[in-house]
Image (spheres, rainbow, N blue to C red):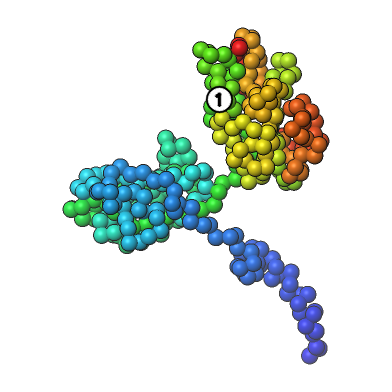
Amino acid sequence: MPRVGVRAVLRAIAPAAIFAAVAGIVPLGSAGIAAAADGLVSQGKAVTASSAGGSAYAAKYAVDGNTSTRWASAAKVDPQWIQVDLGTKYTVSKVVLQWAASCAKTYKVQVSTDAKTYSTAYSTTSGNGGTDTLTVTKSARYVRVTGSVRCRSTGGYSLYEFQVFGHKSAQPFVLSSSAFANNGHIPDKYTCQGQGHGGLNISPPLSWGSGPSGTKSYAIVFTDTGNGIKHWAIWDIPTSVHSLAEGLPNGYDVPGLTPAKQKSWGKGTAATQFFGPCPGGVDHAYTFTLYAVNTTTLPGASSASLPADVEPIMQSHNVGSVVLTGHSTATR
């Protein structure tokens, strides 16, 4: 019988082994290829409930990570619910319910992205307490458990822990505002209208998803497309930031948003704050252009720069941009 070298054997079996592993027949070592396990995303988050059987049984105790505390609903009332707000959208993979003696025989787990429309991720009519580990594959910000039939005729519903596992859902690179829709009317309080007209000259809330590969910071320019004036610019926004709250405080170095900088076309103290629409009673379209920038610090920009000076620098370092448009007829 002829001798066959080890290398020859490996060459012969390697293609088949690789094919089998890819096809799911033979694992190549799950530790090397498995996706990272989803984390606990509900602990300490905002939670509400239909009722509580006293302050010692408040809803918050179901998400505090402590199995010696618990949420308990009012007694002998059906249905009852408890809901956790994850704060942002997650891809949920698992829900773990650690029931107290007052468990739910019939209950359902529902999810929602807006706390208005819900879909059922799990339901049962044969709950018996203990710990229920439920596989849930849903995109959600809100997760609710509703009990409709109690395990015991006395008492209510009670959970030691209400745990949700998952990971943050990828957000598209889109700029939006909770204050107005794209191509919609910019509310008067964000304009430069004078006293008695509602104008407060404050920045609207803005939010966006992660920028494309190569993004090292974000920058925004606010422009009146009717006359081309660049009203306001903010730059050096860290990549960890994906939203700006309403009413950014005044300051070239934006307070609470280090190392971001801002400038407007205003004068004096108005030069370092948001400068809202002032089209003089005629409808103008305004754009918020968000730039994904390939540098953490915008070179050449300074406290002496105007928004019109800074935008070309943003454009020269741009790896992707998105635009939010709003309309205004505000007058001074």
Quarter of the figure with the N terminus: bottom right
Of residues 6 and 279, which is closer to you in this image?
279
Of residues 216 and 181, which is closer to you in this image?
216
Residue, far front: 268
Residue, far bottom: 1
Of residues 282 and 172, which is closer to you in this image?
282
Question: Image check: 108 left or right of 156?
Answer: right
Vertical placement of 90 versus 273: above or below? below
Of residues 274 and 187, which is closer to you in this image?
274
Question: Image check: 47 left or right of 183?
Answer: left
Q: Residue 275, image x and y in percent?
A: 64, 23
Q: What residue is pinned by disc 1? A: 180
Residue, x 60% and y 68% (percent of image)? 30
Q: Determine the secondary structure under disc 1.
A: loop
Residue, far left: 154
Q: Name the image quarter holding residue 281.
A: top right
Q: Name the image quarter holding residue 321.
A: top right
Residue, x 69% and y 71% (percent of image)? 17
Q: Residue 130, image x and y in percent?
A: 32, 62
Q: Amino acid at mark 1?
A: Phe
Residue, x 76% and y 34% (percent of image)? 302
Decide: few, some or many residues near mark 1? Use Cα within 10 Å; few <14, some 14-19, many ≥20: some
Count how many numbered circles sit on residues in the image: 1
Quarter of the figure with the C terminus: top right
Residue 226 visible? The answer is yes
Q: Residue 48, image x and y in percent?
A: 36, 44
Residue, x 33% and y 44% (percent of image)? 49
Residue 210 visible? The answer is no
Question: Image check: 166 left or right of 278?
Answer: left
Q: Name the image quarter holding residue 79.
A: top left
Question: Image check: 254 left or right of 112?
Answer: right
